[in-house]
Image (cartoon, rainbow, N blue to C red):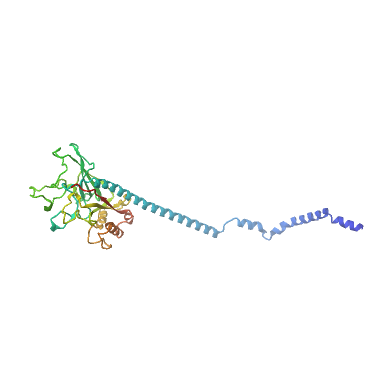
Amino acid sequence: MHQETITKRNESPVGATVSAAVLDATKATGLPLQRRGASGFTLQKQRERASAFTLAELIVSVGVLVLLVFLAAQLLNSAATVTTLDQKQMDADSEARQLFDRMAIDFAQMVKRFDVDYYVKSNASVSSGLRRVLQLGNDQIAFYSAVPGYYPVTGSQSPVSLVAYRVYNPTPAPNPCAHCNKLQRLGKGLVWNAVSTTDTPVVFMPIPVASPLPAGELPSPTPNPLPTPAWPQAGNMTADAAYERVGPQVFRFEYYYMLKNGSFLTIPWIGPAHSSPYGMQDVSAIVVDIAVIDPKSQVLVNDAQIATLAAKLIDYGATTPAVGCSTPNWNNAGELRRQWQCALDGTTGIPRQAMSGIRVYERAFYLSPSVQ
């Protein structure tokens, strides 16, 4: 009985606690011994190695960084290229818009009377004896319009001006030529009739504007002497102070007629009933095509290269298509613009940076009814 009591006392919680404390002390004393080895603190060195990069990891990291920088540079270059092309197109669009707005005003205010003359192109046959004004390459046009112009310093100003358009390209061309291969507009303000002995007012038939009248348009009996053009500079490249650059980036200018019978021609009347412009009574609209090069691209080419480009853009009604292009069908609207774009796409020998800045535009200007 006494022995059992002693045994039970040894198994009390106090004894168990003392035994555990002795065991924990032994374990605590043995832990450093387990971490020691022949080469020192093995676990500590492994932790030190895990906190550094190996050479392979550095190479991979640098390679990834270089790839990311390269991709970023490519994206920036692509964005810059797209931005440049967009800027070029906006510059060309702005130039064309301003020019067409100016033309719209001039054509809308055109004086359409049967007793005044018009300097407009006409591909009438030679044997017909009718008005034949061939304009190879860039066209010219001149007419009266009720818009302001550059008036003389003296005399009574009328509400009418002589308006003309041309791409300036004289022969021989001066060097340098600041105005060459650029569209010009003539706005010559006219005075009232009989108020000046030096300034020419509006002239009536049979006095022509810029080119002599054919025999078929002269009255009978034929005037003697034959009347000479009042403003020959409106139909050639003669300098005139009333000319101004209205399209500095426009190097090609072409127009044709949409007649009231629905046809597209380079003759401004419907024959055989009519044989002259006669107040443009048969013309429903004048269709204008232009080629524009933006300012940034223009500095990359010289006058000779611009002239070469202009020569590749065929005239309306030409029987031979542009080089590398299909045969034109002039009954289709927009055919001239398509031929021009085809010619530009196949052009070589001109810097591509310059070619990317060239745009072609077409617009129809409808005329109000003529005064009979």
355 versus 228 height, above or below: below
Q: Position of residue 371 (x, y in %)?
A: 19, 47
Q: How many marks?
A: 0
Residue at 66 percent across and 58 percent down: it is 43
Q: Say if residue 345 shows up in the picture.
A: yes
Residue at 78 percent across and 56 percent down: it is 23
Question: Looking at this view, is 20 or 185 the one in front?
Answer: 185
Q: Position of residue 297 (x, y in %)?
A: 32, 52
Question: Looking at this view, is 365 or 370 the one in front?
Answer: 370
Question: Looking at this view, is 360 or 45 the one in front?
Answer: 360
Quadrant holding the N terminus? bottom right
39 versus 372 height, above or below: below
Residue at 23 percent across and 52 percent down: it is 284
Q: Say if residue 241 shows up in the picture.
A: no
Q: Position of residue 86 (x, y in %)?
A: 37, 52
Q: Quadrant of residue 11?
A: bottom right
Question: Looking at this view, is 311 or 33 the one in front?
Answer: 311
Q: Position of residue 293 (x, y in %)?
A: 30, 52
Residue at 87 percent across and 56 percent down: it is 8
In this rendering, position of residue 324 left or right of residue 43: left
In this rendering, position of residue 19 left or right of residue 231: right
In this rendering, position of residue 259 left or right of residue 45: left
